[in-house]
Structures are given as structure tokens and as C-alpha cells.
Amino acid sequence: MKFIKTICQDKLGILILSNEKKSNSLNLEMLDEFVQAFSEFKEKECRVVIIRSNPGSKVWCAGLRIDQLPDAEHDPVPYEYSLEKILKSVENFPGIVIAMIDGGVWGGGCELAFACDILIGSAEASFAITPAKISAPYNPNQVSRVLQRVGNNIALEMFATADVMNAERAASLGILNYLANKENLEEFSLNIARKILSNAPLTIALIKKQIHGLATQTMEQLTRDENNREFIKTVYYSQDFKEGKKAFLEKRRPQFSGK
């Protein structure tokens, strides 16, 4: 791949944004590579994926390439669809996706970060949502991802001012799950990944699916959803649930297989 690098080892996937010459901005080819990478992570049964930039990068992701945005007289749907595909690939990935952020996150980069399940940043992390700078529209899905991280008042502040939010404030508002020292950021993120990898993948996948479902559906709708009900049965009748109960009774760590 030209714009990203991937590693998959011991059920842990790492996706490295590697387009520093353009501040890790997302071009159309990079979007396709991203979707391909997550498809491969799923095929290899990775349970956790860490998205990061290369060491020393000042920008984690600068969002969409402005020069590749559609002109006003053209239909914007194809480009929005390409962006939506990478966000859905993160949200629909059955494992946990960690954004390891050491640098600026701008515009569409915030959408990518906010689509991740856990955000871990250094003091160099910062966030700016900038459509008001160029009078660009946001669709409801894009706004919804911001509202899943912060309340209405903070979301409106971020959209209306387009100001840069530093890491300390982002952590205080819950945008960042953890604020780690720059020199320990990688090891801290890997430790979180290892904790997740030691737990039951089917349960994690089910809870992730339900959390995302509740963001767009009522509890009654999700409870009645047949796919959700079948997923619950899958977890309940799984070998992992049997192993978890047995290990608890035998006072040992369970060995989960994801089956």
C-alpha cells in the first residue's frame, strides 16, 4: 500500500497513516487502502486494531484533501460515500479500534478519530472541526459521531468556532479516554490492547454492536432487532462462555478462542 502501512501479529493489528508529505490527509486512494486494510484485519481475526501515525509526525490526520472535494456543480455523494466507507469499516469492525494520537487531528480526521472506540493521546494531540472555515456541509452521520463524544453545547462550540482544542481539555471532556506521556504513548496503548486481547472477543463484539446501535436506535428497537437477538444467543451458547465459567470455577485465566 502507498499511503498506509499495516502489521498484524498475535491478533493485534496496527494501521499506520503514512502520508506525512500531505499531513496525513485522506485522498481517494488512501480511503480505498484503509477499507482494504480493515477487511484484511477481519480476515486475520485481529481482535484489536491501533490506528497511529508514524513516530515524529506532527499531524495524526488532517482530514479530507480539500483539492479532491467535489465542485459545487457536481454531485457530492460519491465522495461522501468513500469517506463513510472507512468510518463504517471502523465502526463495524468486530474488535476494538484504538486511536493512538500524537499530533493534530483536523476536520475529517476528527470523524475518523471519533469513529474509533478508544482514544489515547499525548500532550501533542489536538482537535479542530473546521467545515465552517470553508462553508462545507456535514451530513447527520458526521454530526452524530461528534455528539457521541461530547454534548450539544461542546459540539456546537467546536463546529461554530473551528478552534483548536488541546489534549488536556479533550481529556477533561472525555474525548480522550487517556492522556499519556509522549514517551510512553506507544507502550501505554499496547498495554490497553493487551488487556482487551485477554478478554472474551464475542462479548466485546456484541457490546460494541449494541453501543453503536443505541446511538442511532431506541432501546426498544435494538431489543427487538433480530440480528441483535441472534448475536446474544451466539455468545450465550459459545465455547468461550463455557470456558469462561469453567476457568472462573477453576480459579485460572480463561483461554478464549472467539468461538
Image: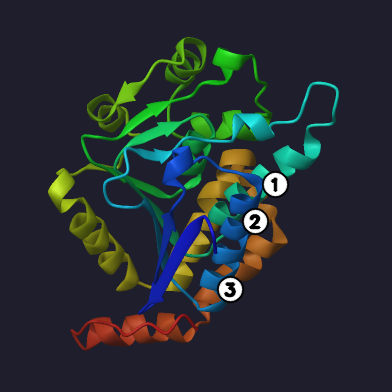
Seen from the viewer's position, the closer of residues 24 and 232 is 24
How far across and how far down the image is residue 239, in percent? 46, 87
Q: CA distance from mark 1 to mark 2?
A: 8 Å
- Between the C-alphas of marks 1 and 3, the distance is 34 Å
**Number of marks in the image?**
3
First of labels 3, 2 by sequence position: 2
Element under disc 1: helix
Task: Pick out the residue farthest to the top.
Answer: 161
Label 3 secondary element? helix
- Of residue 3 and residue 83, the one placed in the foreground of this image is 3
Q: Residues within 10 Å of mark 2 (few under 14, many from 20)?
A: some
The quadrant in which residue 59 appears is top left
Quadrant of residue 33 in the image?
Answer: bottom right
Which label number is shown at residue 198? none
Residue 49, relative to residue 236: is it above or below? above
Mark 1 and mark 2 in contact? Answer it, CB < 8 Å.
yes
What residue is pinned by disc 2?
A: 32
Left or right: 92, with 59 as reference point: right
Q: Is residue 119 above or below residue 129?
A: below
Q: What is the x, y in percent for residue 145?
A: 54, 35
Q: Nearest the camera: 33 or 151? A: 33
Residue 172 location (% of width, % of height): 25, 28
Label 3 crowd (10 A; few <14 / some 14-19 / many >=20) = few
Say what amino acid the circle numbered 1 marks.
Answer: Ser
Please name the residue that numbered disc 1 is placed on.
82
Residue at image position (50%, 84%) is 259
The dot on residue 233 is 3
Q: Nearer the viewer, mark 1 or mark 3?
A: 1
Task: Name the N-terminal-most of marks 1 and 3.
Answer: 1
Report the Cα–Cα distance between label 3 and label 2: 34 Å
Q: Earlier in the sequence, mark 1 or mark 2?
A: 2
